[in-house]
Amino acid sequence: MTATQLVPPATETGDAGTRIASAEVLVTSPGRNFVTLRLRTEDGVVGLGDATVNGRELAVASYLADHVTPLLIGRDAHAIEDTWQYLYRGAYWRRGPITMAAIAAVDTALWDIKAKLAGLPLYQLLGGRSRRGCLAYGHASGADLPELFDSVRAHLEQGYRAIRIQTGIPGLGSVYGVASSAHAGVGGGTRYDHEPARRSDVPVEEEWDTRAYLRHAPRVFEAVRAEFGPDLPLLHDAHHRLTPIQAARLGKSLEPYDLFWLEDVTPAENPAVLRRVREHTTTPLAIGEVFNTIWDYRELFEEQLIDYVRSPVTHAGGITALRRIFDYAAVYQIKSGVHGPTDVSPVGLAAALHLGIALPNFGIQEYMKHSAETDEVFRPTHRFEDGLLHPGEQPGLGVEYDDEVADAHPYARAYLPVNRLSLDGAMHDW
Ligand code: GCO
Ligand code: MG
């Protein structure tokens, strides 16, 4: 090759056996919807990637099946970076949750294949183990304090060492993130799985009142600290609902209760408003579960406006892209806090754990536990022990997709809830 020649395209490199022979988009609904990309090399090595965007699943399935999978056939499965750039720069229409979830699925499946070809668990290719396990936090919730305390206790019994706290608000009906009383525990028949978009033709409508919330939240944390002591790391999610000054007030009012983090205080579209919040409070801030690229974090990192990055592998362009985000975050002493509700599939969770166990600036991993039906489809091999998650030692991601079980759970349309103000019914952020 002469110096002026272009790099050979990924279709012309690699051994014949490592070229991609098939690319399938799999949609299943074992209690909730998941979109999975499965790539297979000519030699029959299989890689999986999670492409689930909660409540908008079929948009990603179409993006992949109609526009991406035809481009993958014949490409060298080893060319992960080139494939990422090809799909990101090549599309012209960059960023956004659908595009980035599709790219993430391809990227994750290629890492799965590469690790299987190496005969190693994926984390070994990402630098090897940096810690014993990934600290996980679970979701405790209750309509009132007694229910909340029961839920916290149930989580402690399961071994969780960090807990997110959400409660009902006096005077309001159903509030996001709060399990109904029958489901406030975890495990077995009482598992908490409020997050799924509900199967219905229209979204469920929830109710909101910011003043009532701002009054109630400090009382809840005061009570939880009084009951469970000063040591337990506590987290809270404000779900993008506040203005900067309201967020500043919340952060300040929660300072006596020493939160591990306060999450998503303001809407994601205007991240620089966190400057205002930061001026007023030392409560650590986390954001990013709806961000999709490294550029969304630029001001937040460079001005050290946050403490934890919430992006999951699934929605931020895959392992390749998320690792770059975390390396950039590390320059500013900012840590990972990867999104891990049940709408991130076991494939997305496995990818997060392989990355998390290797990362120097790992912070915490959200962990809600998938249902037994979901685990039957994906057969994950990660373990949860003593509050830590372990990615396992299987070559690749350690997840296997069971077509027969998956096919028994066909897609069912489902929507995330919407949120309206109690005062006048106007739409509000949820
Ligand atoms: C969290 C999140 C989730 C999201 C859900 C949307 O912190 O776990 O806020 O509960 O609402 O993933 O699809
Ligand atoms: Mg959240």
Image (cartoon, grey):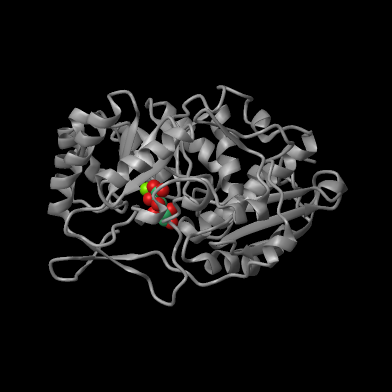
Q: Is residue 109 above or below residue 392?
A: below
Where residue 300 appears, x then y in whole percent?
Answer: 32, 38
- Seen in the image, is 49 located left or right of residue 227? right
Q: Nearer the viewer, residue 208 or 107?
A: 208
The N terminus lies in which quarter of the figure? top right
Q: Quadrant of residue 121?
A: top right
Q: How many marks?
A: 0
Side of 396 where 412 appears, left or right: left
Residue 146 relative to residue 337: left or right: left
View extreme (bottom): residue? 201
Q: Quadrant of residue 294?
A: top left
Question: x%, y% of residue 312?
Answer: 49, 45
Residue 322 lies, in percent from the top left, at 51, 40
For the residue pair 187 and 37, the one nearer the viewer reads as 187
Indicate the quadrant where residue 356 lies.
top right
Residue 291 visible, this angle: yes
Residue at (33, 53) in percent of width and height: 178
Q: Position of residue 221 (x, y in %)?
A: 23, 37
- Quadrant in which the C terminus is drawn: bottom left
Q: Nearer the viewer, residue 312 or 344?
A: 344
- Measuring 56% from the left and 44% from the top, which residue is drawn there? 349
Q: Residue at x 32, y 23 (%)?
A: 231
> Can residue 271 be seen?
no
Toward the viewer: 313 or 409?
A: 409
Decide: is 86 above or below 25.
above
For residue 66, above or below residue 405? below
